[in-house]
Image (spheres, rainbow, N blue to C red):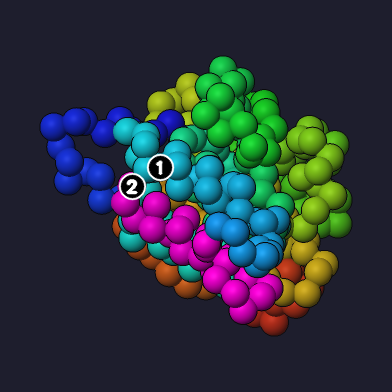
């Protein structure tokens, strides 16, 4: 999920960046809770401000106001996730992929729990030098893009890929399951899951098959009230599109903007449209 660079001779490309700054400022303003009627923005007053959500928002505004890195997603695509997070925050937000836009995503979930999963350890170090206050865990993918079709056949034949044997942590028999993540991932139920990684544009790269499948399992196994929002980017590519339709299900697709799809997935136990002996669609 590495960002593009903003050419200095192309100022019109700063539009997505400006939108990101506006969104961050909006969150900052909404969460600026003044607890007295005095003018809190003037020095010397006794007004008190709830500062619990301010640091990451201010850091995001400073970062995106001074950087030449812009998000991979367009402003319209960013707006989809912004609206979801704005309606739910504080919430549990899991992101597959890491980039300079990660600080923006974290700032959209004030007082919530946001975690990023990234396969490139050198890239993690680089991003953390610019945004040290985000939460990142490395993940080792065991899949390759060239094997996407075979993995679909494996899923159908492997008992541990489906109920009643389906589980996440320690499930090494199902090759589409990310089974050795940090326990924090399995201990939480995620309200929003964004899939914008790992890399999936060359045959030898991991591809997003395991990320999509694991996100689908998390959503279907949810026990808390409510639904899981799954947002996947780069659906213009065949593997992302096929796996999203197979495991996130076309019937749960609520919005499509640019290269981004937004699914709202109920737990399997609450899905009245689920056919007998099926789990995903």
Q: Identify the residue at image location x=37%, y=48%.
A: 73
Q: Which residue is mark 1?
A: 64
34 part of magenta stretch: yes
Range shown magenta: 17-42
User: Viewer-proximal residue, 218 or 249?
Assistant: 218
User: Viewer-proximal residue, 99 or 12?
Assistant: 12
Q: Which residue is mark 2?
A: 17
Q: Is residue 244 above or below residue 34?
A: above
Q: Is residue 61 above or below residue 248?
A: above
237 part of magenta stretch: no
Q: Is residue 277 above or below residue 7?
A: below
Q: Identify the residue at image location x=25%, y=45%.
A: 14
Query: Residue 170 bears which disc, if any?
Result: none
Category of crowding for the residue at label 1, using alpha-carbon neighbours closer than 10 angstroms: few (below 14), some (14–19), many (at least 20): many
Q: Identify the residue at image location x=52%, y=63%.
A: 41
Label pair 1/2, CB-CB below 8 angstroms:
yes
Q: Residue furthest bottom?
A: 272
């Amino acid at each position: 999920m590495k960002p593009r660079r903003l050419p200095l001779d192309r100022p019109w490309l700063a539009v997505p960046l400006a939108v990101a700054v506006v969104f961050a400022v909006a969150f900052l303003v909404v969460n600026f809770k003044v607890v007295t009627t005095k003018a809190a923005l003037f020095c010397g007053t006794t007004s008190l401000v709830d500062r619990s959500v301010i640091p990451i928002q201010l850091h995001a505004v400073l970062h995106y106001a001074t950087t030449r890195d812009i998000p991979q997603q367009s402003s319209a695509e960013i707006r989809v996730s912004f609206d979801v997070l704005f309606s739910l925050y504080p919430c549990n937000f899991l992101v597959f992929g890491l980039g300079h836009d990660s600080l923006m995503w974290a700032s959209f979930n004030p007082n919530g729990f946001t975690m990023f999963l990234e396969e490139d350890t050198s890239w993690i170090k680089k991003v953390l030098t610019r945004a040290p206050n985000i939460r990142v865990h490395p993940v080792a993918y065991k899949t390759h893009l060239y094997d996407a079709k075979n993995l679909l056949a494996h899923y159908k034949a492997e008992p541990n890929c489906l109920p009643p044997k389906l589980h996440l942590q320690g499930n090494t028999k199902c090759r589409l399951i990310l089974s050795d993540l940090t326990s924090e991932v399995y201990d939480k139920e995620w309200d929003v899951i964004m899939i914008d990684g790992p890399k999936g544009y060359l045959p030898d790269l991991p591809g997003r098959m395991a990320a999509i499948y694991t996100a689908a399992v998390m959503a279907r196994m949810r026990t808390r009230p409510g639904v899981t929002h799954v947002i996947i980017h780069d659906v213009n590519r065949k593997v992302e599109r096929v796996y999203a339709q197979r495991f996130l299900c076309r019937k749960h697709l609520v919005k499509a903007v640019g290269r981004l799809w937004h699914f709202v997935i109920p737990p399997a136990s609450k899905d009245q449209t689920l056919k007998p002996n099926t789990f995903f669609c």
